Image (cartoon, rainbow, N blue to C red):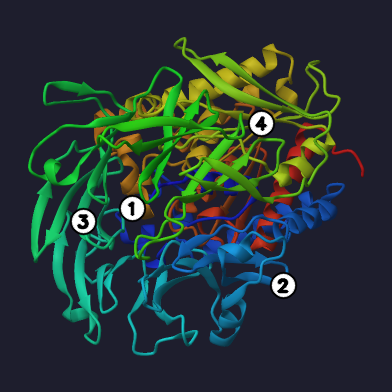
Amino acid sequence: MTLLTRRQALALLGATSAPFTMAQTAAATPLPSTEEDPFLWLEDVEGERALNWVREHNATSRKLLEAEPGFADTRQSLQAILDSKERIPAVVRRGDWLYNFWRDEKNPRGLWRRTTLQSFQLAAPTWDVILDLDALARDEKENWVWGGVQQVGGPSNRCLISLSRGGADAKVVREFDLATRRFLADGFSLPEAKSEVEWLDQDHLLVGTDFGPSALTDSGYPRVIKLWKRGTPLSAASTVYEGQKADVAAFASVDPTPGFERVVVGRSPDFYTNEMALWQDGKLLPIDKPLDAQLSFWRQHVLIKLRSDWTVAGRTWPSGALLLGDAAAYLKGERHFTALFTPTSTRSLDAYTTTGQQVLLSVMDNVANRVVAWRQGAQGQWVERAIDTPFPGTLQVQALHDPQVAQDALAEQYLLSYVDFLTPDSLYLGDATTDRLVKIKSRPAFFDANGMKVEQHFATSKDGTRVPYFVVWPRGAKADGSNPTLLYGYGGFEVSMQPWYSASWGQAWLAHGGVAVVANIRGGGEYGPAWHQAAVKANKQHSYDDFIAVAEDLVARKITAPKHLGIMGGSNGGLLMGAVLVQRPDLFNAVVCQVPLLDMKRFNKLLAGASWMAEYGNPDVPAEWAYISRYSPYQNVKVGVTYPKVFFVTSTRDDRVHPGHARKMAARMMAQGHDVLYYENIEGGHGSAANNAQLADRQALEFAFLWEQLGPMPQR
């Protein structure tokens, strides 16, 4: 339920997309007068007047951008990248199989398929196709987009498949049998909604969905969790847990590990806090923990990741630490821990995972990853060791252990991926018992990186904070102030902007002499919770100051100049684009503003917006609107100011960030006489593309806009 996960943020740069119930539009909320907001009618997502406006401006933008030299070739090459069979398939292990969802030119909607680990390690694995989504969409005459799957696991062949219409967050959930490869006509089924579903066992589900009046929170997510028995109607499901209407959501989690089976339910009062309880024998047993800490169980252990300092049992554990304790003792009230990670001024915990017996940590140091492992010794003490991995870049660790497999032969095996800005993805098979890594997959290079280089610099923000950023130099570029430069940022929700390999950026930007820059501004998670918390609510301006400081540093180093500097960001990064646009219009010459928040007076009334008030504040509270109003782009754009040209990109089917934000901002700027382009994909959800062809088209439009503004793209 994040505004934008790291994977989704990177998807906006060159991969896939992410996530609306059309019933949850602004039409259901109180509206201000049209005198106060003359463009309010554009919040009517599927209203004919609004869609006619969208179609008109889509046509205008297409006519201009498709005329740019090289547009068709760029679009074709970008789709070839996205459809390439050379991509490394992302897999999830269940039992004897590795499962993958795959799209390519022959299967634009995608295939759900599986293979064995032995086959997966081959150059051309043998895939068993379970579900052809293109065939399903054709047979059912529905615009289905894959929404994920949940399997019972163990010996069961049952699973729940989620399907989205056009890429929205809201999904239809249907039960599927892996043995017969068919949806079950009499199986579990949920209509379109933002549902929370967990298997308790093959015949019971824990369900949070739109049960009717008062079943959803103000953010549009489930408030009530019920137990649903097979063969009974949903209306007969019994209530297990209820959150509050002002919460972000209620949730349920089932751990099926034999001997350690646990059911946890709870509520998230806001985006960064949660209350949890064990559900045992029909009773709720509250779990005591810091409200903003992340707690999980692992066999006989409990793992707690802190977002604030925690003083307990005579000791203070720092924000950003990961603690391990005995679960049974913890539930009895004991507070004795081993710290598996404590942060420093440059180090933060990026992620962790567990094998059968070990905890693997991915640790960031100045935005580069290393991996360490913790194993319990013979005397019960926990021992740390470093694992020798590629460096410096981004590492992701995925344990292969399936706790529902008895005597699991893969209990200590894991997959490790490595990537950086100029190095295509590599995938390794690791063994935590020996720390041996074997490369099993490599993505080919999609652009010639010879002569290119990556540098990390630090800018000084307005309050003196050092802000890191990466510069990816194209071949032959010099620091003479003339380089077309694209600066990307996000700066919110503790999402880190780590190095990635973007073949799309490589082919359409770097290969033609463009410089690429990624800013690691406050609001992100690059230096742990404190880095994020330094730029929330009343301090949100720090994100914008940091981004401006990076842009100024690029100019001071003569990497570029304002007339050659373009910026790009999506979702919360779209808000970043709008804020710096109105605050420093002199610093940029092109702005690509993707699926953005922009009207911060009304963001909490539109779709999932209420869930983000822990990040931004509540605009209905005068004291909080006082600081939000100072940066809200929609309220601060003015007549008579020379702004850089802006290209707004959004999606009609985005049920996370309302398309009205981009529509209204574009309309207001146009009415004020500013130079604006607008494009809205009718499908696509929060990633503004429902398939590879739409994504390649959107990216080609964006790059055409950037080259038109920052310097003509050289002919091929």
Q: Disc 1 vs disc 2: which is toward the camera?
A: 2
Q: Is residue 693 toward the left or the right of residue 621 in the image?
A: right
Q: Disc 4 vs disc 3: which is toward the camera?
A: 3
**Front residue of 66 and 362:** 362
Q: Does residue 29 appear anywhere in the picture?
A: yes
Q: Disc 3 vs disc 2: which is toward the camera?
A: 3
Q: How far apart are the alpha carbons under marks 1 and 4?
A: 31 Å
**Front residue of 689 and 529:** 529
Q: How far apart are the alpha carbons under marks 1 and 2?
A: 46 Å
Residue for badge 4 = 644
Residue for badge 1 = 31
Query: Quick one: label 3 or label 1, which is nearer the N terminus?
Result: 1
Where residue 314 appears, as percent x and y from the top left, is: 12, 21
Report if the CB atoms under discs 4 and 2 are less than 8 Å apart: no
**Mark 4: few/some/many CA within 10 Å (<14, 14-19, 20+):** many
Q: Is residue 366 above or below residue 160?
A: above
Where residue 697 appears, as percent x and y from the top left, is: 71, 56
Q: Which mark is residue 264?
A: 3
**Mark 2: few/some/many CA within 10 Å (<14, 14-19, 20+):** few
